[in-house]
Image (cartoon, rainbow, N blue to C red):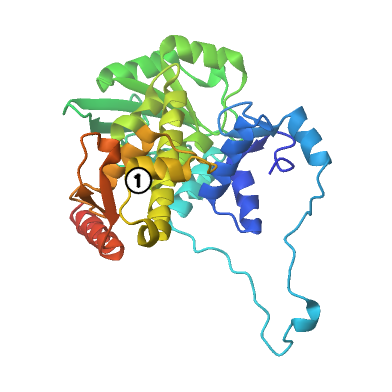
Amino acid sequence: MIQAAENDSIRNDIYAQAKNYGLNTEKARWIAGFLLEAGLLEEPRYLHLKATSLGKQFVSRLPLFNEVLNIEDETDVDESKEPVVATEPERTLADELFDRLGESSKDPMAFGKASGVAFEESIAETFCYMGFDAKRIGGAGDTDVIIRWKDSEGKNIIAIADGKSKSSGTVSHSDISDVAIDMHKEKNNADYVAIVGASFSGDTIRNHARKKKFALITVEELIEVARSSHALGLSLDEIAYIFQVPDGLSKLDGIMEAKRRQMDIITLVISQFRQEQELLGNLSPRDLYLLLRATTISPTLEELMDVFHILSKHEIGILVLVSKASASENSTYMLAHGKSAVNRLRAIVTAIESGL
């Protein structure tokens, strides 16, 4: 992974390479986080990783292979068997949407449509995929995309997005009309303004956007947030940080990292219960803290108590309270009905999706 990030690489490109070594995206993301904390990788900009001088020095001293090795002895291979052909993972509708988004961001006339239309449609579809009410408006005198949602207090919030499809792949300050955007914001009574493009060039556009409170969102960033919205169950209030200037995106990144860590801890807790419950009996958050403190994740007691609270809720019920203690961290739980809990949650999700 350090070698893959030697010359400033995009995270998703590194995660894709990790699949060649049997690592899924979440595992690769966790390893990248560890290497960042160890000072072997750095994050020169959002969603990018680069090997540090220490990382390069570290790798230079290790015997590394450049490919996955077949550990079976050649003499044991049964030549009568059909060779195993690696298959591409099945593509989803989301993958196709994100491909269209990326392609149309660099081709104004993509898919035979009028200039910018395909990109604007893809932006609207991506926000709909995340759960927003988004529509392409387009046309002279109005915004490209309008995005609506209700915040946690029930207030109606509106954002407008201006899509900039450039064959060069780069949006510059001269591509943005302040007068037009301000008019579109006022016309739609919008709370936020976003400009979406493949990339943005120079400090001028960034400084100006910060001054005007226009969020600059790259296609890469939008896709990462969209994927995370499903993988991590992000709320619309959380995703909406993407519109906030100047540090909304970094706040959202922090939320996503915290949620990824929480998912890792949930996996670890369930796994540890399965391993230890028969031998040790019912377990408390403090028991798990002692059992897991030497692991790489090393969850805090507070994190474990939060996870116990989530998993023992009636709606989930995979952990069942057995003995309540005066100090909640010492209350004991048992792991129960794991498969049925998963099936129940899937049934609820299916019913909700059918009604949406």
The residue that appears at 65% across and 51% down in the rendered structure is 17
**Depth check: 272 or 210 in front?**
272
Q: Is residue 276 left or right of residue 77?
A: left
**Depth check: 18 or 221 in front?**
18
* Amino acid type shown at disc 1: Tyr
Residue 70 screen position, x and y as percent:
73, 68
Question: On the image, numbered disc 1 is attached to which residue?
Answer: 129
Residue 356 screen position, x and y as percent:
21, 51
| Rendered view: 37 above or below 184 | below
Q: Quadrant of residue 80?
A: bottom right
The residue that appears at 66% across and 85% down in the rendered structure is 82
Q: Is residue 315 left or right of residue 166?
A: left
The residue that appears at 56% across and 29% down in the rendered structure is 46
Quadrant where the image shows the N terminus: top right
Residue 287 screen position, x and y as percent:
38, 44
**Depth check: 115 or 54 in front?**
54
The residue that appears at 29% across and 20% down in the rendered structure is 191
Residue 344 screen position, x and y as percent:
23, 61
Under circle 1, the secondary element is helix
Q: Is residue 146 left or right of residue 117?
A: left
